[in-house]
Image: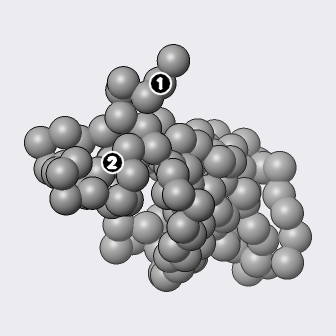
Amino acid sequence: MLDSPRVCVQVQSFYIESQSSPEDERFVFAYTVTIRNLGRTAVQLLGRYWLITNGNGRETEVQGEGVVGEQPHIEPGNDYQYTSGAVIETPLGTMQGHYTMVDAQGEAFKVEIPVFRLAIPTFIH
């Protein structure tokens, strides 16, 4: 499986205070991912892998097909955006991972998702 520079991933995370319960060690975050196809051919996202780490260093792995129930085709020059969520036991954590994709020839490749923070606003300085 190849790594590909043709696909760019950007993530922005948000704390969802209304669904969180700090006294129960439940901190809910949403994150919006933008996947941009910088290549010359269409690509399709087949699967995802996430490594979620809470502030105590506890790691949770999540993997599965597609994202938010879809396996989107992304045409050259276009992007695909979705929002999902994560729940951790601490007010600060991180997420990172990769997508498994295929190009127009059916060749599989991985796209790294850079590490990003899950943090309640008072923890961001």
In the rendering, at what x and y percent does residue 85 appear? 33, 56
Is residue 78 visible from the viewing direction of this image? no
Nearer the camera: disc 1 or disc 2: 1
Nearer the N terminus, badge 1 or badge 2? 2
Q: Position of residue 72 (x, y in %)?
A: 47, 65
In which image quadrant can residue 68 be found?
Answer: bottom left
Q: Amino acid at mark 2?
A: Phe
Work out how far the residue at label 1 is from the one at label 2, CA to CA, in angstroms: 14 Å
Q: Give left or right: position of 66 versus 40.
A: left
Q: Secondary structure at mark 1?
A: loop
- 55 or 95, which lies in front? 55
Residue tagged 2: 29
Asked whether, in this view, residue 70 is left or right of residue 15, the answer is right
Residue in the foreground of this view, choosing between 68 and 120:
120
Which residue is rendered at x = 46% and y = 44% of the image? 92
* As drawn, 94 above or below 103: above
Left or right: 115, with 53 as reference point: right
**Nearest to the observer: residue 60 or residue 6:** 60
For this rendering, which residue is in front, 105 or 38? Answer: 38
Residue beneath the point at 36% across and 59% down:
89
Circle 1 residue? 124
- Give x and y (percent) for residue 1: 85, 78
Q: Amino acid at mark 1?
A: Ile
> What crowding class fits label 2: few (fewer than 14 Cα within 10 Å), some (14-19), or many (20 or more)?
many
Q: Quick one: which residue is furthest to the right in this view?
A: 2
**Location of residue 86 by image quarter:** bottom left
Q: Position of residue 83 (x, y in %)?
A: 35, 50
- Secondary structure category for the residue under label 2: strand
